[in-house]
Amino acid sequence: MATEATGSESSLTFHPMDQFMVTPLFGDGAVHWYTITNATLWMALAVLAIIALLVFGTRGRAIVPSKAQSVGELMYGFVYKMVEDISGKEGLKYFPYIMTLFSFIVFANMLGLVPMSFTPTTHIAVTGVLAMLVFVGVTVLGFVKNGAGFLHLFWITSAPLPLRPVLAVIELISYFVRPVSHSIRLAGNVMAGHAVIKVFAGFAAIALVSPVSVLAITAMYGLELLVAFVQAYVFTILTCVYLKDALHPHH
């Protein structure tokens, strides 16, 4: 009886965080910087999906667009308007980079919802690099465009003079925290949803609660589809805000 109980318990054992493990695509050796991993594969698939939609899907430029061309044009127009509204006409020079960011994040998030897939954007190693590229890029751009005037970003002229040095320190700290919050927000939200789905999937093995578990998984998948888009949108809109600060640093 004890053996049967143990076997029953082990069959219900599940590890929600195992899905985020980076493993070699070939073999079982250690993961090095040059190792082709499951993360490498799914990032490559995200890039191929972007090319399929935005290059091959729109190359016909038909007056009556196909479904792929319609989606590509909607995505293009959505990001273009976002950049123009937040960063201004001057920010449109950097639209290709921002469009690339949005496309990669949204496709990586969406592909991560395919069963047995891997979601690269659940890892700080991926989102951190994206956030640092934005941070370094807008900082360099700010100094190139404005010189020492970029430091006006930290000097709030509308505040009383005695408070300005204190606020400058706070602004400086918050500025350097940007890549941390930028990356953790994306990775944390995507990871949380995937972990919850995995937990519900584990309970599906219990006959008594399996109908509720299946309904919960279905609902979570619908929510995760929304989160996949919203998190790409949030990352992109924050990038536009940071770009605006670089172009127009005066408070």
Image: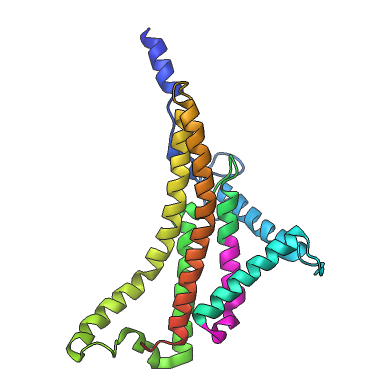
Query: Which residue is painted at 48% across and 65% down in the image?
Result: 235
Query: Which residue is painted at 67% across and 61% down in the image?
Result: 50
Query: Which residue is painted at 26% across and 83% down in the image?
Result: 168
Task: Specify whether 205 is left or right of 89.
Answer: left
Horizontal and vertical percent position of residue 142: 45, 85
What secondary structure do most residues of the magenta stretch adopt?
A: helix
Which segment is the magenta one? Answer: 88-104
Horizontal and vertical percent position of residue 30: 51, 45
- Judged from this view, the residue extending furthest toward the front is 64
Query: Which residue is painted at 41% across and 68% down in the image?
Result: 179
* Magenta region includes residue 114: no
Horizontal and vertical percent position of residue 145: 48, 90
Horizontal and vertical percent position of residue 171: 30, 78
* Magenta region includes residue 93: yes
Depth check: give the residue in front, 221 or 12: 221
Q: Is 52 placed above or below 158 here?
A: above
Q: Quadrant of the C terminus?
A: bottom left
- Residue 95: which quarter of the image? bottom right
Task: Specify whether 163 is left or right of 240.
Answer: left
Q: Is 19 placed above or below 71 here?
A: above
Residue 196 seen in the current view: yes
Q: Quadrant of the N terminus?
A: top left
Depth check: give the residue in front, 245 or 21: 245
- Judged from this view, the residue extending furthest toward the top is 1
